[in-house]
């Protein structure tokens, strides 16, 4: 009697590969390699990995101030009285905060847009956290907004859109320098490049 694919576990492996391939920067080959790596480990590893994923998903949410992902409310950076509340660095994703923090070049606070403008992908201004950013500028405590969107077509378009939206509010708007190669991403830049980009920021 022939064994059906479901009984061989082939469907389960294919599903795992499919889900892993949905991660950013992970193609089918990498997803396949990751899937078989997981399956080669002790079953306890897969259970621990699954538990960690579920816990992270259940326990984290957007910070009510900066919109980054956090377990605490507000997040650690927003709650730190030692941070400069007069400077806000705007990034596309929560992961973009880490390289800037590693550089040590910025001691202000952040704002996460959760994306960048992309008409081809249907991402419009109202899909980003721009309204929340503008609300943070009310009261005049913020003196500078640093736009650290990625140096891509989408990132540049987002930066110029935000500049236009914030100009009437009378706040200084700057853009990180081009120390980061065009078309690249902040999360992959080294500490020196990020430091140069932050310190070399210019008016936009």
Image: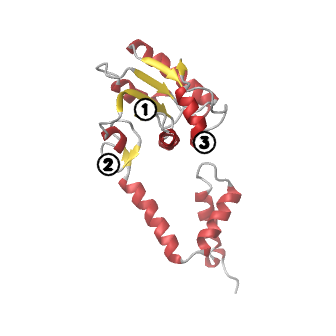
User: What secondary structure is found at the residue carrying circle 1?
Assistant: loop
Per the model, the C-alpha gap separating discs 2 and 1 is 20 Å
Q: Earlier in the sequence, mark 1 or mark 3?
A: 1
Residue 193's spot in the image, x, y percent?
60, 35
**Residue holding disc 2:** 72
Residues under numbered marks 3 and 2 in contact, where contact means CB atoms less than 8 Å apart:
no
Per the model, the C-alpha gap separating discs 1 and 3 is 27 Å
Per the model, the C-alpha gap separating discs 3 and 2 is 28 Å
In the displayed structure, does residue 60 sit left or right of residue 92? Answer: left
Viewer-side residue, 167 vs 117: 167
Residue 125 visible somewhere in the drawing:
yes
Image quadrant in which the N terminus is located:
bottom right
Q: Is residue 180 above or below residue 37?
A: above
Q: Earlier in the sequence, mark 3 or mark 2?
A: 2
Q: Residue at x 47, y 19 (%)?
A: 173
Residue 117 visible somewhere in the drawing:
no
Q: Is residue 57 above or below residue 122?
A: below
- The part of the image, by quadrant, that contains residue 184 is top right
Q: Is residue 19 above or below residue 122?
A: below
Q: Residue at x 44, y 17 (%)?
A: 172
**Badge 3 local density, few (<14 within 10 Å), some, or many (20+)?**
some
**Residue holding disc 3:** 190
Q: Is residue 142 above or below residue 41?
A: above
**Badge 1 local density, few (<14 within 10 Å), some, or many (20+)?**
some
In the displayed structure, does residue 73 sit left or right of residue 118? Answer: left
> Nearer the viewer's eye, disc 1 or disc 3?
3
Please state the total of marks drawn on the protein image: 3
**Residue holding disc 1:** 129
């Amino acid at each position: 009697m022939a064994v059906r694919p479901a009984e061989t576990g082939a469907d389960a492996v294919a599903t795992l590969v499919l889900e892993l391939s949905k991660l950013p920067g992970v193609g089918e080959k990498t997803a396949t390699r990751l899937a078989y790596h997981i399956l080669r480990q002790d079953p306890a590893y897969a259970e621990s990995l699954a538990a960690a994923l579920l816990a992270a998903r259940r326990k984290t949410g957007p910070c009510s101030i900066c919109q980054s992902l956090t377990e605490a409310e507000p997040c650690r950076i927003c709650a730190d009285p030692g941070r400069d509340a007069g400077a806000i660095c705007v990034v596309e994703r929560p992961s973009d905060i880490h390289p800037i923090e590693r550089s040590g070049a910025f001691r202000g606070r952040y704002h996460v847009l959760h994306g960048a403008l992309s008409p081809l992908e249907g991402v419009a201004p109202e899909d980003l956290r721009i309204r929340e950013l503008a609300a943070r500028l009310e009261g005049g405590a913020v003196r500078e907004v640093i736009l650290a969107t990625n140096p891509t077509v989408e990132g540049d378009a987002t930066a110029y859109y935000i500049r236009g939206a914030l100009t009437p509010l009378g706040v200084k708007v700057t853009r990180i320098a081009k120390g980061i190669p065009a078309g690249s991403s902040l999360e992959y830049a080294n500490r020196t490049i990020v430091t140069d980009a932050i310190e070399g920021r210019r008016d936009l």
